[in-house]
């Protein structure tokens, strides 16, 4: 038996961690700025890196530390943006054992006492390196007193000291600290760049993984290289032979995107039975009801975006068949319906989270969604009203000269007194009832759509409906109702629908 310890397995996120600026992906602007600063010998005394998890903040800090302290293979080189990785300082920094490069996790060391240790040590020169470097991760976790204690040293540090901060919450860092640092915002890595990086790592590991699987990993990582690499590591461990998209879906607990699109289509068509059957099928296959609704919300957002900007469908993580279906749905679904779907899905997600049975809550949400999808669009209804022929142009003995035929059915009786005054009712529009607002509830919804909040409040709280038919409203006013409510309601409805409305008030009793 050999006495040599076996080499421990190293996860891919650490194994393929960038060692030089050339290895960093997706952060070209920051790399270019740092290279120019090093070349011009204009290196700031403090840097702050901000961005989401896994975009390279701490990695960049270590590369800067190596570049500042690299002496080259011959031991005579100065600061460089291309550290050799072979000299003693480079190797010691990479292994986290350099005495002059100190890393501190502010999430666990938040107090002023921890910062005081730094303040006391900055006055001593570096023991073996060119610069003494302090890397503070998650710097926003420091307490207010710790930040205040650091300010003076951060403003005028000794020439041999450099500070490098990293944070995911830049808004929590005091502006007095930000003003003393050179700031770099590390952006999310673009999907096509991420897919290329994952394919390169998989090839280096001798693993086979399909393009669809890479697309799912990239989408799940949300721009984080570390998350994507960790997911790839897990996928390679789980897969036998070539890792497929189905294996990634099973690993991540995702529903089949095609089936989610099927469910979305059924909901938007108002097919409640079909939607419930599809939900039941996905549930039987192991999908979580909350995840299904979340996927529906994601599809709703995606289709809304590509309806406004069709080029958004060209995302490399979107398969061609899915892209084609999305563009087709975006072309035929109105933005009003998509917006309503989004709002109701957000409400449904809250209900499912609170419900004792998630599946029951999800089914009720789908029933409600399909019912709303069947309701007529008030705006489209108004447009149809505006295109209707007038009473004089209708068949049945109407005058050909464009005049209006006043039949007995079109004449309205005078309305009852309104608090001592009388109002002559306008003739109601004579047309097919199914083409009008067939219920008073639709009238109220129209007022809400037109955002006439004053009239909406008066209609909802200032009247008691007595009789309604398309084109005619009779109501009993509340004691505090405005005297001109009937007149204003009739004028508004005529302006919105292009039809004359008879709105009359009946007295109590």
Image: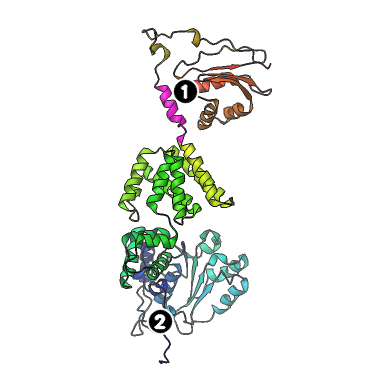
Q: Secondary structure at mark 1?
A: loop
Of residue 498 and residue 507, the one placed in the foreground of this image is: 507
The image shows residue 245, relative to residue 301, as above or below, that is below
Q: Residues within 10 Å of mark 1 (few under 14, many from 20)?
A: many
Mark 1 vs mark 2, foreground winner is: 1
Look at mark 2 in the image and give the residue it sits on: 91
Query: From which residue to which does the magenta span run?
Result: 374-389
422 and 204: which is toward the camera: 204
Residue 376 in magenta stretch: yes
Residue at point 50% right, 24% down? Answer: 438
Q: Write down the quadrant of residue 236 in the picture.
A: bottom left
User: Badge 2 local density, few (<14 within 10 Å), some, or many (20+)?
Assistant: some
The reply to whether residue 317 is visible in this rendering is yes
Q: Establish if 67 lies above or below 396.
A: below
The image position of residue 429, as x and y in percent, is: 47, 16
Q: Residue at x 63, y 28 (%)?
A: 461
Answer with left or right where residue 27 lies relative to residue 159: left
């Amino acid at each position: 038996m050999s006495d040599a310890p076996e080499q421990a397995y190293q996860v891919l996120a650490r194994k393929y961690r960038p060692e030089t600026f050339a290895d960093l992906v997706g952060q070209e602007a920051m790399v270019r700025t740092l290279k120019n600063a090093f070349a011009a010998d204009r290196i700031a005394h403090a840097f702050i890196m901000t961005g989401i998890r896994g975009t390279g903040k701490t990695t960049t800090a270590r590369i800067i530390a190596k570049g500042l302290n690299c002496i080259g293979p011959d031991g005579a080189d100065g600061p460089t943006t291309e550290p050799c990785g072979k000299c003693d300082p480079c190797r010691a920094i990479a292994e986290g054992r350099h005495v002059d490069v100190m890393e501190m996790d502010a999430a666990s060391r938040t107090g002023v006492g921890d910062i005081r240790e730094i303040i006391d040590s900055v006055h001593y020169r570096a023991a073996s390196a060119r610069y003494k470097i302090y890397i503070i991760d998650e710097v926003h976790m420091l307490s207010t007193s710790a930040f205040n204690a650091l300010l003076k040293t951060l403003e005028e540090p000794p020439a041999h000291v450099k500070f490098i901060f990293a944070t995911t919450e830049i808004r929590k860092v005091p502006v007095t600290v930000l003003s003393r640092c050179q700031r770099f915002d590390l952006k999310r890595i673009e999907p096509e760049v991420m897919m290329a990086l994952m394919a390169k790592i998989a090839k280096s590991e001798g693993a086979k993984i399909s393009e669809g699987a890479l697309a799912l990993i990239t989408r799940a990582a949300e721009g984080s290289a570390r998350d994507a690499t960790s997911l790839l590591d897990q996928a390679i461990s789980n897969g036998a032979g070539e890792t497929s998209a189905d294996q990634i879906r099973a690993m991540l607990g995702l529903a089949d995107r095609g089936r989610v699109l099927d469910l979305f289509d059924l909901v938007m068509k108002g097919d409640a039975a079909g939607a419930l059957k599809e939900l039941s099928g996905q549930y039987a296959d192991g999908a979580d009801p909350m995840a299904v609704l979340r996927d529906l919300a994601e599809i709703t957002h995606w289709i809304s975006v590509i309806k406004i900007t069709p080029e958004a469908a060209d995302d490399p993580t979107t398969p061609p068949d899915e892209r084609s279906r999305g563009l087709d749905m975006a072309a035929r679904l109105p933005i009003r319906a998509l917006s309503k779907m989004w709002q109701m899905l957000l409400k449904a997600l809250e209900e499912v989270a609170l419900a004792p049975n998630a599946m029951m809550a999800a089914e009720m949400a789908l029933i409600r969604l399909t019912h709303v999808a069947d309701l007529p669009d008030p705006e489209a209804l108004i447009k149809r009203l505006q295109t209707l022929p007038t009473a004089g142009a209708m068949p049945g003995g109407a005058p050909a000269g464009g005049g209006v035929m006043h039949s007995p059915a079109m004449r309205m009786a005078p309305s009852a007194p309104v608090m001592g005054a009388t109002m002559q009712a306008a003739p109601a529009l004579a047309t097919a009832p199914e083409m009008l607002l067939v219920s008073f509830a639709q009238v109220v919804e129209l007022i809400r759509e037109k955002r006439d909040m004053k009239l909406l409040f008066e209609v909802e709280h200032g009247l008691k409906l007595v009789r309604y038919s398309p084109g005619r409203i009779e109501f009993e006013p509340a004691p505090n109702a405005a005297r001109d409510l009937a007149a204003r309601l009739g004028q508004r409805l005529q302006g919105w629908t292009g039809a004359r409305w008879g709105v009359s008030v009946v007295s109590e009793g």
